[in-house]
Amino acid sequence: QVQLVESGGGLVQAGGSLRLSCAASGRTFSRSVMAWFRQAPGKEREFVAAIRWSAGFTYYTDSVKGRFTISRENATNTVYLQMNSLKPEDTAVYYCAATYSGTYNYIRVRSYDYWGQGTRVTVSS
């Protein structure tokens, strides 16, 4: 059983930084695709970033390119999302997700089989 536990959310001023962590357990992740999604109040869940664990290939939605960085740490099975130059529009609950399907359709919510409980990020103006 795969478990994903997010942490690192909080309140930050615009222009600040946060690093989110996703601790993964229950299965080897070397063949997985891991991703971060976010959901703002009243909006649908949207893709933020993804990483193919074995190759380290990364993919980002346009709105976070150059500001956010997704990475993974093999020794601890942890995925990170470093968020810099945060904007009020980045305010949302951020979710970690995983799939073993080998998909290249990173942005689709249904591509992912496992989800964490979410961590809230609030960016004040």
Image: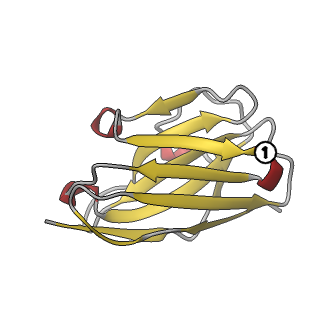
Residue under the image location 54 percent in, 38 percent down: 50
Question: Where is residue 96, by image quadrant?
Answer: bottom right
Q: Residue 3: percent from the left, percent from the top?
A: 74, 64
Q: Residue 38: percent from the left, percent from the top?
A: 40, 56
Classify mark 1: helix, strand or loop: helix
Q: Is residue 16 above or below residue 84?
A: below
Residue under the image location 85 percent in, 60 percent down: 26
Q: How is the image coloured?
A: secondary structure
Q: Is residue 58 above or below residue 19?
A: above
Q: Quadrant of the C terminus?
A: bottom left
Can residue 111 be spotted in the picture? no
State left or right for residue 124 relative to residue 53: left
114 and 123: which one is in front?
123
Residue under the image location 36 percent in, 57 percent down: 17
Identify the residue at the far front of this view: 16
Tell me the residue that label 1 is attached to: 74
107 and 11: which one is in front?
11
Q: Quadrant of the N terminus?
A: bottom right
Q: Say what amino acid the circle numbered 1 marks.
A: Asn
21 and 59: which one is in front?
21
For label 1, count other residues whose C-alpha is less than 10 Å away and answer few (under 14), some (14-19) or many (20+).
few
Question: Where is residue 54, by image quadrant?
Answer: top right
Q: Residue 16: percent from the left, percent from the top?
A: 29, 59
Can residue 109 be spotted in the picture? yes
State left or right for residue 39 relative to residue 123: right
Residue under the image location 44 percent in, 69 percent down: 9
Q: Residue 52: percent from the left, percent from the top?
A: 66, 32
State left or right for residue 21 relative to residue 26: left
Q: How many marks?
A: 1
